[in-house]
Amino acid sequence: MAKREDLPAPAQGLVLTHFLTVRDVHVSSRFYADILGGEVVLAENPGIVKIANGWIIMNPGGGPTPDKPEVVLTAPEPGDPVSSFLNVRVADLAAFYEQATAKGAHFLTEPLDRKAELRCYLRDPDGYLVEVGQATGMLHGVFADRTPADGG
């Protein structure tokens, strides 16, 4: 049985978790444990992986429930637009990238220097986008150039 401190169950106040609708809880749990260095603290119903100072909670999709009427949860399909993503911050992106790639992670690009940060993206087994970044310039007041899309 998992200890209270391993679960997102604060004795007071709150904790922030991220919920993912997944096709296979075991496969997704292994991805977050292996690639992001998490610990599977609950195998299913729901699956919970503790990572650093947070948790990812996973369950298969499903229809409405009494506490969320008219809400249907589904994992993303290939080609679906992205409206949110998991943002992971690391101390050394080059080391993380090397270790994650050796474990089988497939990144969209190598880490790129965006002036404010170094960053790259990968997708999890369900296609969720995961940004991995390292603060660089932003620590010294240097930020990314504005793009035409954001009015720059």
Image (tube, rainbow, N blue to C red):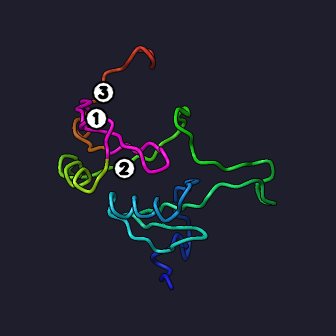
Quick check: is 124 in the magenta stretch? yes
Q: Could you tell me residue 68's position as x and y percent?
A: 76, 54
On screen, residue 118 versus residue 71, left or right, reads left
Q: CA distance from mark 2 to mark 3?
A: 18 Å
Q: In the rendered structure, which disc, 1 or 2, sits on the residue that comes first in sequence?
A: 2
Residue 76: assigned label: none
| Circle 2: residue type | Val
On screen, residue 36 versus residue 43, left or right, reads left
Q: Residue at x 52, y 37 (%)?
A: 78
Q: Could you tell me residue 64's position as x and y percent?
A: 77, 54
Disc 1, SS: loop
Segment tinted magenta in the rendering: 106-132
- Looking at the image, is 26 positioned above or below residue 111? below
**Number of numbered discs visible in the structure rendering:** 3
| Circle 1: residue type | Thr
Which residue, given by chain and number where applicable, does mark 1 sit on?
Answer: 109
